[in-house]
């Protein structure tokens, strides 16, 4: 999705319909996150990481936050993490966030 500030809209930028599994697999990222729990169990958690760019105008921040909240509700996401500083977005940070869901 992207935000059109002039129209004050959140716009779906790309959507796939009637896509084969093979084609969908090609669109998905090669890498996924493998989480090894302290007891040795392995999981591949689905999580939503939200980053609102620093320096945005307040109205843009409100639109980002509103779009995030609606997406979380519609998709029923449970692992939602937010960061303002993308430099913090690393494996250590993600493990700390996921530790809550053990």
Image (spheres, helix red, strand yellow):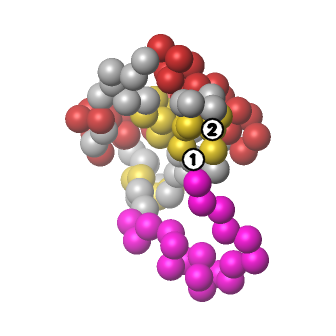
Q: Can residue 30 be found in the magenta stretch? A: yes
Q: Tell me the quarter of the picture where residue 71 sits.
A: top right
Residue found farthest to the front:
6
Report x, y in % for residue 23.
59, 82
Please, what secondary structure does the residue beneath circle 1 have?
loop
Residue interval drawn in magenta: 13-31
* Residue 87 percent coordinates (x, y): 23, 35
Q: Which numbered disc flags the more N-terminal residue, 2 or 1? A: 1
Along the viewing direction, whichever of 6 and 69 lies nearer the viewer: 6
Q: Position of residue 28 (x, y in %)?
A: 50, 69
Magenta region, main secondary structure: loop
Q: Is residue 101 visible?
A: no
Q: CA distance from mark 2 to mark 1?
A: 7 Å
- Residue 98, position in %: x, y? 46, 38
Task: Choose between 37 and 44: the one closer to the eye.
Answer: 44
**Residues packed near mark 1 inside 10 Å, few (<14), some (14 to 19) or many (20 plus):** few
Foreground of the two, 59 or 94? 59
Where is mark 1, residue-wise?
1
Residue that label 2 marks? 10
In contact (CB < 8 Å): disc 2 and disc 1: yes
Query: Disc 2 on helix, strand or loop?
Result: strand
Residue at 37 percent of width and 30 percent of height: 53
Whether residue 39 sits left or right of residue 62 in the image: it is: left
> Magenta span has 26?
yes
């Amino acid at each position: 999705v992207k935000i059109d500030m002039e129209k004050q809209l959140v716009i779906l930028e790309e959507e796939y319909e009637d896509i084969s599994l093979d084609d969908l697999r090609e669109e998905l990222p090669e890498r996924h996150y493998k989480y090894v729990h302290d007891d040795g169990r392995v999981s591949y958690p689905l999580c939503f990481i939200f980053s609102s760019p620093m320096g945005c105008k307040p109205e843009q921040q409100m639109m980002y936050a509103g779009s995030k909240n609606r997406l979380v509700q519609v998709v029923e996401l449970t692992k939602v993490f937010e960061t303002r500083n993308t430099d913090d977005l690393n494996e250590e940070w993600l493990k700390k966030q996921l530790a809550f869901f053990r």
